Image (spheres, helix red, strand yellow):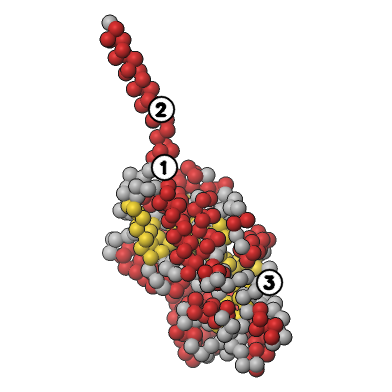
């Protein structure tokens, strides 16, 4: 009898232990995915972008030591090359587990429309993310009630970087309007200074969209993308004229320069201004440059009070080879720890609203303030306002314009692009 009683006690202990493990199983499973690998695809291969990604990978490796992180980055400005590689992989049925995509029409009009990514509502609910993600972002990553990606940051597109020493030496104040900018660049050009550093074609589209925003104002600019502003209007013609004039102040070798090359001209003292997103600030800090000494910043002239934004986000592929590993990666990407590790290095602010502002430098703290108070408009170059087809047609028209500088023909091509792929259909 004693022996039987011992066995009964032992079985009771084992049963209790089993119940305890079952009760804890949800958390344990979230912390230890079954998959032994995850492949994450992005275009963050250099500067603060790559360093920020490595910081977030470090968080992942700590949280999920049993899962190999396969960093499948592909070089290419603004993701142009990477997204071409990704498209080929998706067409051949070889998706990475998760890939970088811009919140907005790039995500909804391409990957959701193509049935290539999974909804993430359950993950959002489990992680409580709806309580800490900006309300402005959720509609941009949602379709028919489903949420399709995890945003990791907020970037500002309409930033004009400048060299304080060059402006001071030439008696030039930081311009706030486009006319003031033309006057400043006339002064600099007459002094033998390159007024505006520019790079390859995607940076030219980036410049163009900020000039459209600064010339038209936020409401009319936003109307370009929903059909309320006519692409063939006199106002758009005037904005394109401004863009053509701005180009006359740029370096002649722009087509051969990356965005880093163009940005570096400013901090090296070889150009006065550069229009680039705030990932440039991460690059400047990587170069050891000091804010407000080696570089300054302001909204692109004409856009004061407007925050033209984009947001990098990550997806879960339909047919992902390692779905549990992908979910583990997305959990880190959306976490406070992951975003606080990533964004101060990358040169962006958290998508989450609860990050510690003291972790960020003076520029990014100013961006946080503007994001909270400015009117918000979306970026063309970085996927917010136009789907891939429309953006591609605009890019083709821009390439022809950069060759012949014919504003009338450029406007006609932009009208045709809106009819073919935009709301002008």
- Residue nearest the observer in this picture, 413 or 268: 268
Q: Quadrant of the N terminus?
A: top left
Q: What secondary structure is marked by label 2?
A: helix
Quickly name the residue at label 1. Answer: 30
Residue situated furthest top in the rendering:
1
Q: CA distance from mark 1 to mark 3?
A: 44 Å
Give the mark nearest the N terminus, 3 or 2.
2
Q: Find residue 226 and report its image quarter.
A: bottom right
Horizontally, is 193 left or right of 328 in the view? right
Circles 1, 3 touching at the beta carbon (< 8 Å): no
For the residue pair 124 and 363, the one nearer the viewer reads as: 363
Q: Considering the numbered disc 3 on the image, is that residue within a helix, a strand or a loop?
A: loop
Label whose residue precedes the other's in the sequence (1 or 3): 1
Please give the name of the residue rendered at 68% of the width and 90% of the height, measured from the top-left corner.
187
33 to 291, vertically: above or below: above
The residue carrying pointer 3 sits among few (fewer than 14), some (14 to 19) or many (20 or more) residues within 10 Å by Cα, namely some
Q: Which residue is mark 3?
A: 304
């Amino acid at each position: 009898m004693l022996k039987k009683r011992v066995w009964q006690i032992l079985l009771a202990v084992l049963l209790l232990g089993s119940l305890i493990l079952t009760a804890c199983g949800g958390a344990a499973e979230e912390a230890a995915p079954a998959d032994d690998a995850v492949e994450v695809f992005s275009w963050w291969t250099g500067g603060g972008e790559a360093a920020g990604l490595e910081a977030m990978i470090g968080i992942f490796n700590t949280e999920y030591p049993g899962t190999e992180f396969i960093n499948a980055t592909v070089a290419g400005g603004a993701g142009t090359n990477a997204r071409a590689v990704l498209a080929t992989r998706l067409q051949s049925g070889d998706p990475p587990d998760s890939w970088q995509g811009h919140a907005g029409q790039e995500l909804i009009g391409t990957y959701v429309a193509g049935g290539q990514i999974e909804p993430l509502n359950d993950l959002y609910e489990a992680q409580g993310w709806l309580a800490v993600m900006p309300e402005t972002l959720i509609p941009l990553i949602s379709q028919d009630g489903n949420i399709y990606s995890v945003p990791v940051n907020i970037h500002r597109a309409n930033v004009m970087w400048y060299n304080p020493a060059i402006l001071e030496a030439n008696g030039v104040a930081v311009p706030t309007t486009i006319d003031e900018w033309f006057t400043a660049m006339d002064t600099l050009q007459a002094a033998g200074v390159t007024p505006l550093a520019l790079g390859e074609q995607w940076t030219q589209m980036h410049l163009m969209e900020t000039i459209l925003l600064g010339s038209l104002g936020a409401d009319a600019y936003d109307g370009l993308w929903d059909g309320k502003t006519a692409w063939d209007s006199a106002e758009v013609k005037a904005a394109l004229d401004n863009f053509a004039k701005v180009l006359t102040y740029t370096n002649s070798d722009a087509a051969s320069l990356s965005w880093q090359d163009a940005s570096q001209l400013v901090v090296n003292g070889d150009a006065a201004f550069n229009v680039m997103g705030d990932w440039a600030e991460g690059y400047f800090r990587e170069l050891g440059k000091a804010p407000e000494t080696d570089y300054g910043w302001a909204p692109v002239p004409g856009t004061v009070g407007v925050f033209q934004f984009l947001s990098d986000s990550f997806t879960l592929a339909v047919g992902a080879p390692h779905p549990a590993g992908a979910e583990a990666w997305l959990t880190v990407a959306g976490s406070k720890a992951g975003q606080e590790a990533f964004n101060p290095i990358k040169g962006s602010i958290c998508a989450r609203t609860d990050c510690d502002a003291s972790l960020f430098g003076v520029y990014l703290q100013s961006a946080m303030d503007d994001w909270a108070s400015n009117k918000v408009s979306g970026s063309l170059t970085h996927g917010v306002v136009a789907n891939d087809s429309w953006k591609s047609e605009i890019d083709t028209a821009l390439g022809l314009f950069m060759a012949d500088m014919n504003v009338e023909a450029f406007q006609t091509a932009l009208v045709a692009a809106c009819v073919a792929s935009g709301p002008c259909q």
